[in-house]
């Protein structure tokens, strides 16, 4: 039995949303935060991608042989889980400096503005790279020493 296994990372930025899994252009199911799902497929070549709202992952081409399971890892865009907490921390630092310490920290506003451009890019122009779907590296492969 040939299968495609999709393992979704648990991330706070897409936690409440289910992500659709598409194999050969057809939606085969959804995957929730932190879940792992398997989908049975025919032997041969397949094209897989994930989609959430209007954003998606790049398409992956797989060639599957009989009785093999191909594992894929699914996550949000690079640095997506760090960008918002970092920006909120900078904003907190700005407001503490301005109102509690009476210090001029206006340059921090520009850092926040520039930082918000990164996720905005991924939901507009970079919408086809919002999600990352990649083949999972097999950690169980034993290396021979020479």
Image: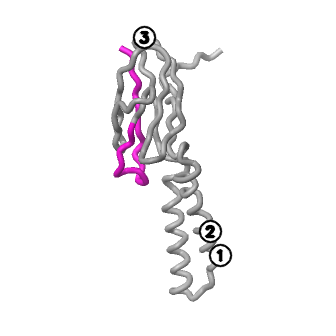
What residue is drawn where x is 35% and y is 21%? 40
Q: Are marks 1 and 2 in contact (CB under 8 Å)?
A: yes
Q: Quadrant of residue 28?
A: top left
Which mark identifies residue 111? 2
| Residue 1 drawn above or below residue 99 | above
User: Looking at the picture, how far across and down is residue 83, in whole percent?
Assistant: 53, 58
Magenta range: 1-20
> In the image, residue 58 lies at what x, y percent?
54, 37
Residue identified by numbered label 1: 107
Left or right of 5 in this view: 125: right
Q: Of tags 1 and 3, which is closer to the observer?
A: 3
Q: Where is residue 68, by image quadrant?
A: top left
Crowd band around label 1 with a 10 angstrom C-alpha radius: few (<14), some (14–19), many (20+): few
**Residue for point 56% across, 81% down:** 97
- For label 3, the residue is 66
The answer to which of marks 3 and 2 sits earlier in the sequence is 3
**In this rendering, position of residue 102 left or right of residue 43:** right
120 versus 57 height, above or below = below
Query: Which residue is drawn at the image coordinates 40% and 15% (left, top)?
Result: 42
Q: Residues within 10 Å of mark 3 (few under 14, many from 20)?
A: few
Magenta span includes 81: no
Q: CA distance from mark 3 to mark 2?
A: 52 Å
Residue at the extreme top: 66
Q: Residue at x 57, y 19 (%)?
A: 143
Q: Secondary structure at mark 2?
A: helix
Question: Disc 1 and disc 2: Cα gap in Å?
Answer: 7 Å
Above or below, comparing residue 63 to residue 52 in the picture: above
Q: Residue furthest bottom?
A: 102
Quarter that holds the C terminus: top right
């Amino acid at each position: 039995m040939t299968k495609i296994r999709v393992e979704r990372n648990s991330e706070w930025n897409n936690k409440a949303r289910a992500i659709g899994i598409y194999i050969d252009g057809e939606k085969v199911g959804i995957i929730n935060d932190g879940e792992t799902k398997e989908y049975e497929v025919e032997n041969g070549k397949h094209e897989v991608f994930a989609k959430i709202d209007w954003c998606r992952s790049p398409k992956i081409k797989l060639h599957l042989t009989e009785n093999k399971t191909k594992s894929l890892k699914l996550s949000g865009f690079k640095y997506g889980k760090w960008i918002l907490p970092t920006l909120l921390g900078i904003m907190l630092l700005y407001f503490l400096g301005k109102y509690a310490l009476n210090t001029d920290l206006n340059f921090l506003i520009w850092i926040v503005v520039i930082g918000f451009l990164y996720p905005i890019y991924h939901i507009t122009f970079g919408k086809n790279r919002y999600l990352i779907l990649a083949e999972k590296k097999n950690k169980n492969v034993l290396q021979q020493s020479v």
